[in-house]
Image: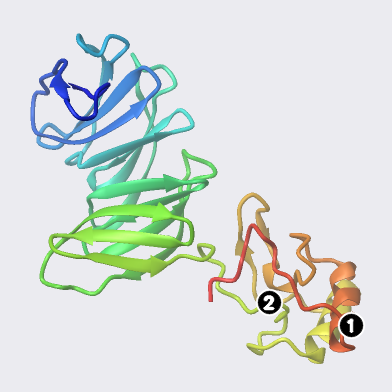
Amino acid sequence: MVDVSNPLLPIFAGAYDTPGDLYGVFIAGDYAYLADYMEGMLIIVSILDPVNPTFVGSYNTPGFAYDVVVSGGYAYVADAFTLQIIDVSTPSNPTFAGSFDTPDNARDVYISGNYAYINDKYSLQILDISDPPNPAFVESYDVPFLGRFYRDVAVAGDHIYLGETYSVIILESGSPGCDYIIGDVNGSDSYTGLDISYGILFFTGGPAPTYECECSPHGVWYVSGDVNGSCNYNGVDITYGVAYFKGGPAPIPCPDCPPGE
């Protein structure tokens, strides 16, 4: 711990020795959550008195704990071949909540909203964690191999940043798992009057739109059908679409689920 009350003169404040190699740290409230790589362990330390940090609890993970992020009472540990999800609502007694096997080597994790972004050495893995004990795969992206491992991941706005030894790869995120063309409900890759007809048939018992996705916080729905920005697909979108093709206002996507491309 370093006292930075004077940013121009940082000074040593205190320390806590971990049994192995400390690879990751996350601060939440009065606690520091430590990812101990060699021991494969999540360690929770009270920093109520930063000069004298004290042990509170620990949890042995099955792999090598590279990184940890805490959100909503759960600690998400990038643990080599899995993402381990630990219930830390009682810091003195952390317990297993769930896990997700990654294809390669989970080295870093970042939480944004209901999504976990995992740097998996050679790929980016995105999970839906709206139900933390049951993380669900959303999508993955194979990053270009530049001869070195990817080590870090961060998300800001509509971009995902993947760090490796000498460079940063920047990806445009849009809405995870929701790459669609607004208004296209019949799968033609365009929005035309045929989509209006298809929608009318759907609302009178015909076939469902060809594309749906899970877009938090709205669940799984026909996101491409929403053309009036209401974050719902209903008959009002049909009326809006008819008006658009007669010279009315342009389609508006759900602001929570913008098209990914």
Would residue 4 be found to the left or right of residue 236 on screen? Answer: left
How far separated are the C-alphas under marks 1 and 2? 14 Å
Query: Where does residue 151 sit, x and y in percent of width and height?
Result: 20, 54
Image disc number at residue 242: 1
Q: Amino acid at mark 2?
A: Ile
Would residue 257 be found to the left or right of residue 142 on screen? Answer: right
Viewer-nearest residue: 167 or 238: 167
- Residue underneath mark 2: 182
Residue at 33%, 62% (x, y): give it.
124
Would residue 250 be visible to someone looking at this image? yes
Residue at 67%, 88% (x, y): give it.
190
204, above or below 155, in the image: below
Q: Amino acid at mark 1?
A: Val
- Quadrant of residue 31 within the rendered picture: top left
189, above or below 62, in the image: below
230, above or below 46, in the image: below
Identify the element where label 2 is drawn.
Answer: loop
Mark found first going from the N terminus, 1 or 2: 2
Identify the element where label 1 is drawn.
Answer: helix
